Image (spheres, rainbow, N blue to C red):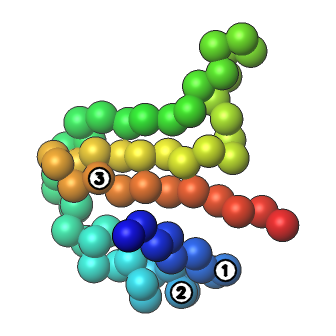
Amino acid sequence: MYQPQYVNNTSDFIRRHGGILLSVLGKTLSEAWVIWDNEDNEWFPDGPVLLDFDGVILEFCCNIQ
């Protein structure tokens, strides 16, 4: 079951996800995905961004309150 891990600051982000970020160092960014609005010809900034580094896929999303 998918369970996102939201954090509120940079220190928590690095502590939780630093290992996976280090694992993609030196890898090639092969693909990137965003949610695109064809009508306005722009991406949805509140949607997730997925980055594929040679098969290691990182998902970034934001929940602004």
Which residue is at 69% across, 47% downward?
46
Packing grade of label 1 (10 A; few <14, some 14-19, many >=20) is: few
Q: How many marks?
A: 3
Type of amino acid under label 3: Ile
- Return the disc, 3 or 2, that comes first in the chain's sequence: 2
Type of amino acid under label 1: Asn
Q: Secondary structure at mark 2?
A: helix
Q: Is 43 on the left or on the right of 48, as rendered? A: right
The x, y position of residue 32, in whole percent, is: 38, 36
The numbered mark at residue 28 is none
Packing grade of label 3 (10 A; few <14, some 14-19, many >=20) is: some
Which residue lies most toward the front here? Answer: 1
Q: Which residue has dot 1 on it? A: 8
The numbered mark at residue 57 is 3
The Cα atoms of the two marked residues, 3 and 2, are separated by 20 Å
Res. 28 image quadrant: top left
Position of the N terminus by quadrant: bottom left
Q: Are marks 3 and 2 in contact (CB under 8 Å)?
A: no
Q: Are marks 2 and 1 in contact (CB under 8 Å)?
A: yes
Packing grade of label 2 (10 A; few <14, some 14-19, many >=20) is: few
Type of amino acid under label 2: Asp
Q: Secondary structure at mark 1?
A: loop
Discs 3/2, front: 3
The Cα atoms of the two marked residues, 2 and 1, are separated by 7 Å
Is residue 43 depicted above or below 63 in this figure? above
Which residue is at 46% across, 73% downward?
3
